[in-house]
Amino acid sequence: MGRLDGKVAIVTGAGSGFGAGISQAFAAEGAKVIVADISQAGGDATVKANPSAMTFHKMDVTNSADWKATVDAATHHYGRCDILVNNAGTSYKNKPTIDVTEDEFQKTFDVNVKGVYLGCNAVSAVLKEGGVIINISSVGATRPRPGLVWYNASKGAVSNATKGLAAELGPRQIRVVSICPLVTGTGLFSHFTGVEDTPENREKFIFNVPMGRIGEVDDVSSAAVFLASNEAKFITGVNLEVDGGRCI
């Protein structure tokens, strides 16, 4: 018996990184998964790992019509939807705030905040009692640092909305939680830190991490499986830091 047997999940940004890892972990635990991503190639690569349990659906999380089509795809392929993982996210490259363009700011908030707003509205309308929404936030939501000011602010909005939605949807027995990862080796290390991904540069970012390393994809996917499962049936409104103790 898998921990998510009989469940149907939509995972956004599922063509790479956390989204791919979460989709594959959910499928391994018995869930059926709509792998949603703007990249056809990325989505197909994720599905290839377990095609009997996953179906790709191309979508742009900033488009409300795409959200309706994605929810329709879940009900068409699998008859229901139980879990939403709002994982799709973006950022500009780490740099001084004065150098952040208006277009970079707008895209960051459109994907990271508007995408979560649209997803929660579209999916909460069809979630049954016991449904789960997992938002991927960031340690930057509560421990912002120079260089990614508006990215961190967008994740602060996600963490705040997680708590508000948990309070609002709780009477329907829908749980809303977020995962707040530390920077991980997903290929975005340079993007987030502003320096090349080398062992020497990684050392500069882990000196204040009690567990002495950056994050890994399975740190986040394992947390997502737990939060989506009945093992977490009384956990809601939590912004779970998966950070090796960085935020202490």
Image (cartoon, helix red, strand yellow):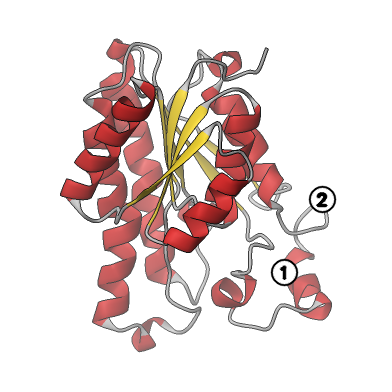
Decide if residue 164 is on the left or right side of residue 216: left
Judge by depth and name the residue closer to the eye, 182 or 146: 182
Residue at image position (42%, 62%) is: 39
Residue 194 is situated, as x and y percent measured from the top left of the image, at 58, 81
- Whole-angstrom CA distance, mark 1 to mark 2, is 12 Å
* Closer-to-camera residue (38/111): 38
**Location of mark 2 (residue):** 211
Pinpoint residue 54: horizontal percent, then vertical percent. Answer: 51, 37
Could one spot residue 248 in this view of the protein? no
Can you tell which quarter of the image residue 189 is in?
Answer: bottom right
Give the residue drawn at x 73%, y 59%: 214
Q: Is residue 48 above or below residue 184?
A: above
Circles 1 and 2, Cβ within 8 Å, touching? The answer is no
In the picture shown, does residue 134 fall above or below 30? below
> What is the quadrant of residue 104 in the picture?
bottom left
Q: Is residue 93 visible?
A: yes
Q: Position of residue 156 (x, y in %)?
A: 39, 52
Most extreme residue toward the left is: 65
Helix, strand or loop status at disc 2? loop
Upstream in the sequence, badge 1 or badge 2?
1
Q: Which residue is mark 1?
A: 205
Residue 55 lies left or right of residue 5; in this view the side is left
Residue type, mark 1 in image: Phe
Whether residue 218 is situated above or below residue 111 in the rendered picture: above
The quadrant in which the N terminus is found is top right
Query: Disc 1 on helix, strand or loop?
Result: helix
The 10 Å Cα crowd at callout 1, few under 14, some 14 to 19, many 20 or more, is some
Q: Position of residue 28 (x, y in %)?
A: 65, 30
Q: Residue at x 29, y 12 (%)?
A: 172
Q: Is residue 206 above or below residue 72?
A: below
Identify the amino acid type marked 2: Met
